[in-house]
Image (tube, rainbow, N blue to C red):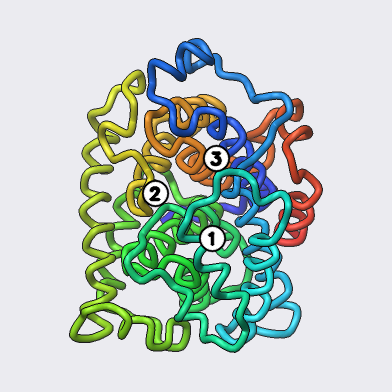
């Protein structure tokens, strides 16, 4: 595996995520003809003015802030992360800026998380695998010095506080791992194969210290069976992705190949597909992701995270990056982890 240190990958990842979110936010819920009628040819899509983001970026910042707080007290553990993460998610839930069409799963879970007397597992929606689980997970792929166990455990834990389905956990783990690999210089041409190997290696590994008894909320005979269901669905979509990368025309809606992105494994796959179609053309990748019939803001925010992790902060033109909403907060986290 090629490992190369990239310049300002954390800043590039978070900026790309927010730019994709802002580009895709106005096209979410629209079909392709409607998007083209509103925006013109997809290769010429421009960042809206103002460049407003959705709950995807807001919750990414919430997770990133919780990580920063937890790590200020020592090594990353579930015990250190739970309090700050609950607090950040609940603060987001009550914020007047939480008006960007957030998902019902996140809203319901955060309302329960606000009751500090209840274990977090009570909040987790055990049958939900919406893309809200993995559209916000990128920060943990950027934090330096984490072990593989810490990165995987925290990725699944942040998802589980709202989305408890095993596929949501596995897809979030894979998304964080993809960001981590790209930030370390892994060649995009070999990325899907590495993700498949990672999924196979972790297929029956349940992170007890991070997830506790979450698996008992489902109808599985044991924790290994529970988590394997999630990895199997991710392996299936990675197989579709591997085929799509070789065969899909860039002019065709990527959702037709790997899904509309409303659920976690499809958001990961379609976001990756858009990036892998244009690994060295980040704005083209973002535009392709935003011009899709599915969950365009979540797909594009993941595409932006992958492109930023691969290319660094220089991937994004200043005229776009400097006017993205929450610019200061994004730079604060990015600068911390780039350092």
Residue 222: give x, y in percent of width and height: 23, 86
Tell me the tag on residue 176. Answer: none
- The residue at 73%/36% (across/down) is 324
Q: Quadrant of the N terminus?
A: bottom left
Label placed on residue 304:
3
Label whose residue precedes the other's in the sequence (1 or 3)? 1
Quarter of the image where one finds residue 86: bottom right
Front position in the image: 305 or 188: 305
Q: Is residue 306 left or right of residue 76?
A: left
Crowdedness of circle 3 by 10 Å Cα count: few (<14), some, many (20+)?
many
Q: Residues within 10 Å of mark 1 (few under 14, many from 20)?
A: some
- The label shown at residue 107 is 1
Q: Nearer the viewer, mark 1 or mark 3?
A: 1
Confirm whether residue 148 shows in the render.
no
- In this rendering, the answer to whether 39 lies above or below 319 is above
Counting residues from the start of the chain, the first of labels 2 and 3 encountered is: 2
Q: CA distance from mark 1 to mark 2?
A: 22 Å
Q: Secondary structure at mark 2?
A: helix
On screen, residue 241 above or below 3: above
Q: Residue at x 45, y 71 (%)?
A: 160
**Residue at image mark 2:** 268
Q: Residue at x 70, y 85 (%)?
A: 74
Which quadrant holds the C terminus?
Answer: bottom right
């Amino acid at each position: 595996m090629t490992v190369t240190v990239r310049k300002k990958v954390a800043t590039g990842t978070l900026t790309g995520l927010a730019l994709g979110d802002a580009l895709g936010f106005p096209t979410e819920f629209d079909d392709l003809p409607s998007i083209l009628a509103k925006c013109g040819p997809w290769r010429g899509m421009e960042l809206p003015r103002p460049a407003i983001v959705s709950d995807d970026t807001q919750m990414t910042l919430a997770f990133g802030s919780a990580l920063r707080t937890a790590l200020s007290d020592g090594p990353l553990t579930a015990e250190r992360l739970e309090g700050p993460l609950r607090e950040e998610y609940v603060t987001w839930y009550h914020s007047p800026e939480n008006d960007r069409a957030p998902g019902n799963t996140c809203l319901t879970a955060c309302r329960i998380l606000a009751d500090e007397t209840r274990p977090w597992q009570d909040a987790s929606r055990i049958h939900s695998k919406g893309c809200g689980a993995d559209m916000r997970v990128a920060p943990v792929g950027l934090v330096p010095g984490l072990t593989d166990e810490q990165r995987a455990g925290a990725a699944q834990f942040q998802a589980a506080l709202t989305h408890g389905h095993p596929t949501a956990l596995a897809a979030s783990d894979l998304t964080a791992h993809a960001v981590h690999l790209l930030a370390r210089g892994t060649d995009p041409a070999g990325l899907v194969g590495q993700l498949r190997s990672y999924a196979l290696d972790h297929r029956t590994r349940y992170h007890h210290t991070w997830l506790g008894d979450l698996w008992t909320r489902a109808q599985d005979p044991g924790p290994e069976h529970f988590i394997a269901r999630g990895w199997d669905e991710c392996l299936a979509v990675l197989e579709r992705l591997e085929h799509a990368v070789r065969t899909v025309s860039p002019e065709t809606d990527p959702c037709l190949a790997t899904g509309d992105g409303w659920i976690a494994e499809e958001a990961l796959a379609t976001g990756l597909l858009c990036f892998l179609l244009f690994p060295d053309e980040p704005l083209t990748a973002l535009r392709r992701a935003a011009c899709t019939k599915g969950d365009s803001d979540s797909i594009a925010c993941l595409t932006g995270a992958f492109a930023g992790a691969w290319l660094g902060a220089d991937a994004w033109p200043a005229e776009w990056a400097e006017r993205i909403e929450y610019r200061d907060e994004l730079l604060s986290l990015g600068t911390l982890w780039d350092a």
